[in-house]
Image: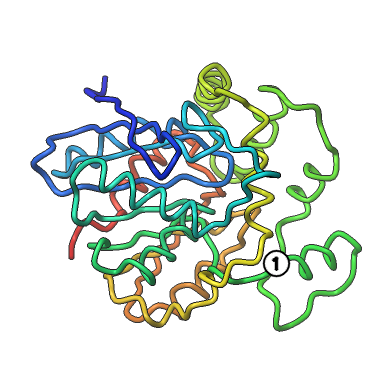
Amino acid sequence: MLDTHERFVTSGPLRIWTERAGDPERPAVLMIMGSAAQGVSCPDELVGRLVERGVQVIRFDHRDTGRSSVVDFDAHPYTISDMARDCLAVLDGYGLSSAHVAGASLGGIIAQWLGVHAPDRVRSLTLMSSSPMGHDPSAAWARAQAGEPADPDDLPPPAPEFLAHVAADLPPGVESDVALFRVFNGPVRPFDERAARTMLELALSRAVDPAAAANHHRAVWRDDPGLLAPLSSITAPTSIVHGDQDPVNPLAHGAALAAAIPGAVLHVVPGMGHVMTSPGLPEEVAGLIRIDD
């Protein structure tokens, strides 16, 4: 059982729910989860293993998820850069001048933004199941959904299983989410449905407004000049952790990140999909998160 302490921090007018595990005197790892994902989607097993490695770990709910503030997106639209500034507010709220930063999926794009625009706050980067920031996947997705051949210059689109799930337009709720996570998990490693269901039920129960998380999708497609900065300017030691069965961002996305960031190391995790819902996988990934600088 993790020994954790919760608190809210402020990011402008917003309140951001956070949770810390581990010794506050140790170096910090800031975990940034993906689109529509709460801090509780970061597995306890991963956090516990990191604490065993000698760091404190901070998880948090993005704006519009969990217990953090809900935003009227029509009145106050925001971008990925704004979500990245929430991360800086979390560090400020804990009095941390810098942290090791680990981001998954959209969280990995936010982590890249921090590496480019706030390099003094980033001790190291770990980018998990992510894709280069500024990459526009819309054309590749459209070609894939229309059954058209891929453009050689495109990073590969999501797997057909994921596109089919999205096209099915299932009603919102835990059952639909479990079905999505089964696709996210991929076909190779066993899917821990019980653990996924428990996490998804917890997330639903603690969400101020479950529907608000859909605003992240709107934010992703907004023009955001901050995402266009070159990844070659990142100076933090960087590790890329990517599954070879990722149905959302196929492995080529991780390879592209490794090629774009100077000195980045690519760790390919056999059988891993887009999430850590297979027994033993959270601990395995925790061992790959960079905590050197």
Residue kind at label 1, given as amino acid type: Pro
Give the vertical position of 24 relative to 103 (above or below): above
Q: At 72% from the left edge and 56% from the top edge, which residue is drawn?
A: 159
Q: At 40% from the left edge and 77% from the top edge, which residue is drawn?
A: 261
**Count of marks, rendered view:** 1
Left or right relative to 36: residue 176 = right
Task: Determine the secondary structure under disc 1.
Answer: loop
| Residue 160 coordinates in the image, percent (x, y) | 78, 54
Q: Residues within 10 Å of mark 1 (few under 14, many from 20)?
A: some
Name the residue nearer the viewer: 122 or 8. 8
Left or right relative to 146: residue 291 = left
Q: Quadrant of residue 180?
A: top right
Look at the image and tell me in which quarter the C terminus lies.
Answer: bottom left
| Residue 88 coordinates in the image, percent (x, y) | 33, 52
Give the vertical position of 154 relative to 182 (above or below): below
Q: At 54% from the left edge and 27% from the top edge, which residue is drawn?
A: 196
Name the residue nearer the viewer: 262 or 213. 213
| Residue 212 coordinates in the image, percent (x, y) | 64, 34
Name the residue nearer the viewer: 276 or 225. 225
Q: Which residue is mark 1?
A: 137
Considering every residue shown, the one lying at the far left of the view is: 25
| Residue 277 coordinates in the image, percent (x, y) | 51, 36
Look at the image and tell me in which quarter the N terminus lies.
Answer: top left
Q: Quadrant of residue 57?
A: top left
Give the vertical position of 118 relative to 14 (above or below): below
